[in-house]
Amino acid sequence: MQEEIQLSRDVDAIQIPSGDTINLPAGTPVFITQRLGGTFTVATSAGLARISSSDADALNIDLAAEQEKVAEAEALKDAPIEEQVWGQLKQVFDPEIPVDIVNLGLVYDCSVEEEDGQTVVGVKMTLTAPGCGMGPVIAADAQSKIMTIEGVDDAKVELVWDPAWNQDMISEEGKMKLGMI
């Protein structure tokens, strides 16, 4: 059973699925529907919204308990950069689906190149639906997570639509989390 939480202060959030920034005032009642990838999807009387981990205090959440995934990424810090990139991408979530973008099959390509003496990561990814307003937000999440990797100078995350995504692209792990197998 989900517990209603009253926001302790004003919070800027991203409306789902439009991707528009909205303000949720202090005292707004919310229910957390998902806590993955360092963000929180909340249900409000106006629909779903996504709240950043930097605003976890407004939800009365202690982020220390949310740091398990960060510790997993730290364990990869001595791995090759491409492996670290995949590890970071597994911390990016569609706010409506409790499976990371890698296991959803949304990441089509990942490359690490040297360009003018700099290490540049290129990622091609798609979305479950072309009209999803959260696309730029999810791509920006992926880029910001990649940029936390030591030695990466730039990250370019491109949304592509070919081939079109379908449920067959979901990994076995993703299908298990979604109850599909």
Image (cartoon, rainbow, N blue to C red):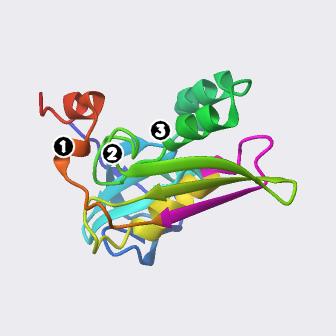
Q: Which quadrant would the C terminus be assigned to in this image?
A: top left
Q: In the figure, 72 relative to 58: above or below?
A: above
- Residue of label 1: 168
Q: In this view of the protein, can residue 42 be seen by the observer? A: yes
Q: Which kind of residue does numbered mark 1 sit on?
A: Asp
- Where, by quadrant of the figure, is residue 170 drawn? top left
- Nearer the observer, disc 2 or disc 3? 2
Residue contact at pointers 2 and 1, CB within 8 angstroms:
yes
The answer to which of marks 2 and 3 sits earlier in the sequence is: 3
Q: In the figure, 63 relative to 123: above or below?
A: above
In the drawing, does residue 43 fall left or right of residue 63?
A: left
Q: Nearer the viewer, residue 96 or 163?
A: 163
Q: Which kind of residue does numbered mark 2 sit on?
A: Gly
Is residue 157 shown in magenta? Answer: yes
- Residue of label 3: 90
- Nearer the observer, disc 3 or disc 1? 1
Q: In the figure, 161 relative to 178: above or below?
A: below
Q: CA distance from mark 3 to mark 1?
A: 18 Å
Residue at the location (51% across, 41% down)? 61
Residue 24: mark: none
Q: Which quadrant would the N terminus be assigned to in this image?
A: top left
Residue at the location (33% across, 59% down)? 29
User: What crowding class fits label 3: few (fewer than 14 Cα within 10 Å), some (14-19), or many (20 or more)?
Assistant: many
